[in-house]
Image (tube, grey):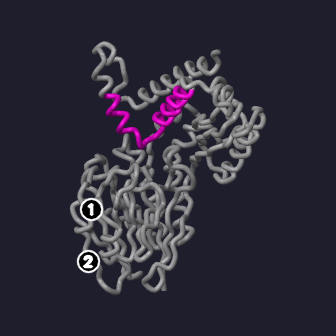
Amino acid sequence: MGFRFLHAADIHLDSPLLGLSRRHELMGRAFAHASRQALTNLVDRAIVLEVAFVVIAGDLFDGDWKDFSTGLAFQREAGRLCRAGIRLFVLHGNHDADSVISRRLPMPDGAFVFPSNRAATYELPEHDVVLHGRSFATREERSSLLPHYPAPVPGRFEIGVLHTACEGREGHASYAPCTVGELAAHGYDYWALGHVHAREILSERPHIVFPGNLQGRHANEPDAKGATLVTVRDGHVAEIEPITLDAARWASLTVDAGGLTEREGLLDRVSRALGKASDEAGGRPLALRLRLAGATRLHGFLQAARPQVIAEIEAIASHIAEDIWLERLLVATADPAGHESRPEADALAGFVNDLTEAAAAEAMAGRLTSEWQTLVAKLPPGLAGSLPVDDPEGRSALLDEARDLALARLTGAGTAD
C-alpha cells in the first residue's frame, strides 16, 4: 500500500528576464514564457504519473501580478490538475507573501493554500497522510516558523511544508531560519522545503529536501531544473527521484584555448562544446554563457577582435540548433609569452568581465541598486535627474554601454605598441 506525490517549489511564474530580450530578441521570446511552460510540464507529469497530490513549497509567483493573466495562467493549470483527481497544496514564500500579492483568484476544489496566520493541517485519510504548513505573512520572515508546526501523531505519514533558507545558503536571504537538526527532531517523515534554487537533499532520516526551482531564471541557475517525485510505501519514503521539467535551459561552459595558435582550432573546440551542451538540453531553447580560458597566442586577438569572435561563435551556435544563443562571452585567457601582456590591458579585461557579470547576476541586484543610488546622490542635480535610478532596464543598458566603452579602450590597449 502506498502513494506518490510531486514536491516542487520556486516556480516564480512570469518572472521577468531583465535585459534578455534587448540583447537577443529571439532568445527573449523563447524564455519569456518558460515559467508557464514549466508549470504546464509539472501538471502534465503529475497526471501521467497519477500522483496523489502536488506540493508547491513557496514562491509560486515572482511578486505581485502586473495583471490577472498571471493568476489565470496558474488557475488553468490548477484546475486541470484537480479535475484529474490530484490535490494541490500551495504555500506562499517571500516572493508571494500575503503582503506582496494584492490580487487573488478563487482556487478550484481540491486545491488548498496554507494560511499565513497559523500552521494549518490538511489530512488525506485515504493515504494516512497529513500535511502541515504556514505561508509567509510578509516578504521578510526573519524568525523561525518551526515552533508553530504541530507535533506529529503516531501512525500517519506526516509532511512539513516550509519555505526557508534553513541554515543559510549563499545567494538566498535567511528567511524562516532553522537547522537540519531541528527539522529532523520535529518528528515528521518528510520536509518539503522551498526557497533554495539548487536541488539538495539535506537529510535522508527523515528526508529533508530542496527540489530546486522549476525553471532556471538566469545564467547563474544553469542545467536541468524540475521537481522531486516521492514514493511512499508502508508509511516510509521508499524512493525519491528528480524529475526534469524546465522548458528552457541555461548553461555555463568553459572552453580551454590553451596551446592554440589558430582561430580555427579554437572555433572547433567551441563547436564541440556547444554541440554537447545542445544535446544535454534535449531540444530546449538554450542560452549559453561561454568562458574562454588558458594560455594561448590568441589572447591578444580575443581581446582586440571581440565582436568578430562573438559573431563567429553565434554563427556556430546557429548551425548546431535553431534555439541556441550565446548569452555572454567571458574572455579569461592569458598570453603564454607573459612579457607581451600589458598590465593595463589585463586590468581592463578583468573590469570588462566584472561589468558583464554585474549586468546579468541576480545575486548582485540589491548591491548594484544600493551603489547606484549612492552614486546618483553625489551627482549634480541636472545630471542625476537624467539617470534611470528606478529603471532596471535602463541601469542594465548603462552597464552595457560602460562595458562597450571599456572594450573600445581594451582594443586600443591590446593593439598599441
In percent of the image, x 31 and y 28: which residue is there? Answer: 373
In percent of the image, x 33 and y 71: which residue is there? Answer: 181
Tell me which segment is drawn in magenta.
Answer: 346-373
Check if residue 357 falls in the magenta segment: yes
- SS state under label 1: loop
Quadrant placement of the C terminus: top right
From this view, report whether residue 240 is shown above or below residue 308: below
Quadrant in the rendering for residue 124: bottom left
Seen as rendered, the residue at the extreme front is 339
Of tags 2 and 1, which is closer to the observer?
Answer: 2
Check if residue 160 falls in the magenta segment: no
- Left or right, 275 with respect to 203, comes to right
Closest to the observer, 359 or 91: 359
Q: Position of residue 334 (x, y in %)?
A: 63, 34
- Name which residue type carries label 2: Ala
Please rate how many residues cluster around mark 2, counting C-alpha atoms within 10 Å: few if below 14, some from 14 to 19, many from 20.
few
- Left or right, 113 with respect to 242, comes to left
- Name which residue type carries label 1: Pro
Q: Position of residue 324 (x, y in %)?
A: 65, 42
* N-term-proximal mark, 2 vs 1: 1
**Residue 77's disc number:** none
Q: CA distance from mark 2 to mark 1?
A: 18 Å
In percent of the image, x 35 and y 66: which residue is there? Answer: 161
Q: Which residue is mark 2?
A: 151
Closest to the observer, 277 or 15: 277
Quadrant in the rendering for residue 310: top right
From this view, report whether residue 389 is shown above or below residue 68: above
In percent of the image, x 34 and y 61: which residue is there? Answer: 166
Residue 82 shows in the view? no
**Residue 115's disc number:** 1
- SS state under label 2: loop
The chief SS type of the magenta part is helix
